[in-house]
Image: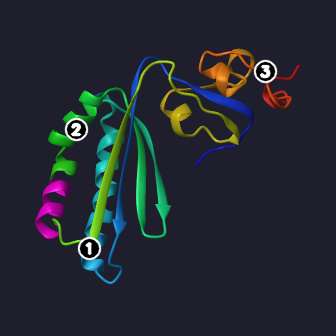
Amino acid sequence: MGKVIPGRYTAQMDGSFVVFIIGMRVNRLWAIHKWLPVFRAMGPMMRELYTNREIGFLDGSVHLSWRGVSLIQYWRSFEELEHYARHGDNHLKAWKNFNRSIGTDGTVGIYHETYMVQQGQHESVYNNMPIFGLAKAGHHIPATGRKETASRRLGRDSEPAVPTPPNPLQRG
């Protein structure tokens, strides 16, 4: 995942962006011949995105759960995300295969959620973490001053409820 960076940091994004969550759920564990191909289709899609960043993909992460997997992705715009969904070779192949082999038989669930985030309408904090999530998709900056609290990161005023220790890398 990366080297842990001691201290408190936040993400800075330039302009609006899209958060896209996509995943699969195994509904019938014994139907491995149905869900394994869906699971395996995710790798080629992710490789395609990481090797073709110019299409609008900023970054993403994979999260495993008891019955499935989710991918959280960050995109520059909805239009670029939709263009990939409709024209990306690996996505189109996986979509067609899913509809042909599973369709609505109930063995495997798939889902996605799309959030269009306007500039300044997000906040995040990463304490003693590798560069992760939105900070990896955008800019990883110290969570100090106007970035110290959630309210301040959203452009509002608030004082910290608990004193914030200094970031070790910013000392003296």
Q: Quadrant of the C terminus?
A: top right
From the viewer's perspective, is the residue at label 3 or at label 1 nearer? 3
Q: Position of residue 157 (x, y in %)?
A: 70, 15
Which residue is painted at 21% across and 49% down in the image?
91
The residue stretch that appears in magenta: 93-102
First in sequence: mark 3 vs mark 1:
1
Q: Amino acid at mark 3?
A: Glu
Q: Which mark is residue 81?
A: none
Q: Amino acid at mark 2?
A: Tyr
Residue 156 vs residue 111, the one in the foreground: 156
From the image, give the main secondary structure of the stretch colored magenta. Answer: helix
Query: How far apart in space, not on screen, are marks 3 and 1 (Cα)?
Result: 50 Å
Q: Number of marks in the image? A: 3
From the viewer's perspective, is the residue at label 3 or at label 2 nearer? 3
Which residue is painted at 17% across and 67% down in the image?
104
Answer above or below: position of 109 versus 141. Answer: below
Q: Position of residue 132 (x, y in %)?
A: 57, 40
Is 105 magenta? The answer is: no
Residue 106 vs residue 78, the one in the foreground: 106
**Would you name the residue on which mark 3 appears?**
159
**Would you name the residue on which mark 1 appears?**
107
